[in-house]
Amino acid sequence: MLDYVKGKLKYKERNRIVVEVFNDSLGIDVKVPDDWVAELNVGDTICVYLYMMVRESGIELYGFRDMRQREVFEDIISVPNVGPETAIRILAELSVDEFTHIVGSGNERMLASIRGVGPKKAERIIFHLRDKYKVPERRGDWDTAVEVLTNLGFERQKVWKVLQNIDWKDKDLEAVIKEALAKL
């Protein structure tokens, strides 16, 4: 099995890249989330963490910017009737932190708003993965903290990371926001 590939980005399009390896003698075609493609430049040296899927029609490689994103992809495709194309679309729309929070908090509406997911698939994903991605019981406070900190101009993904690393026990919302501000 292939774990990752490191090489020069030879080609890119909407959700696909070609990574050139072995002194420009082999190009590996990899499907990746759209949002990452936009950040890449042809000619850059990149490292892509791979997931290999073998089907009757052939072998497909799916690529990710880090191992955590690949792990979440594997979790998503473990859900019955949810395939790799849907999983890639989800990860193009949401960061890993956003996805785990949405699933852990049971926010079907937000997940269903992603193209190709819909209400039934969102319900199925949440049913199968919710326990794995539990969020703090104070979900309303979490959402308020995210809103306050992003309104102050902080990037949503950074806010999510900081809030996940805060111990919420015995703290009111104001204390959590103050601690987050100190870490941002």
Image: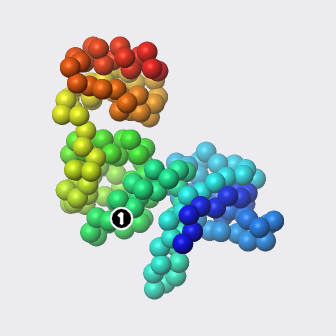
Of residues 116 and 52, which is closer to you in this image? Answer: 52
Residue at 73% from the left image edge and 50% from the top image edge: 44
The quadrant the N terminus occupies is bottom right
Q: Is residue 13 visible?
A: no
Check the image and report above or below for 157 versus 62.
above
Q: On the picture, is 9 further left or further right than 94?
A: right
Q: Is residue 115 visible?
A: yes
Amino acid at circle 1: Ile
Q: Is residue 64 above or below residue 101?
A: below
- The image shows residue 183 at horizontal and vertical percentages of 45, 20
Nearest the eye: 116 or 168: 168
Q: Secondary structure at mark 1?
A: helix
Work out whether 137 lies above or below 36. Answer: above
Disc 1: CA contacts within 10 A as few (<14), some (14-19) or many (>=20):
some
What residue is at 41 percent from the left and 16 percent from the top? 181
Q: Outermost residue toward the right?
A: 23
Q: Which residue is mark 1?
A: 77
Q: Residue at x 72, y 64 (%)?
A: 20
Q: Measured along the vertical axis of the image, is residue 59 above or below residue 163? A: below
The answer to which image quadrant residue 28 occupies is bottom right
Report x, y in % for residue 153.
Answer: 45, 21
115, 132: nearer the viewer: 132
Color style of the picture:
rainbow
Horizontal and vertical percent position of residue 4: 59, 61
Q: Quadrant of residue 85?
A: bottom left
The number of callouts visible is 1
Task: Single out the residue that lies furthest toward the bottom.
Answer: 56
Q: What residue lies at 39% left-to-right and 61% top-to-bottom? A: 74
User: Residue 39: image x %, image y %?
Assistant: 61, 45
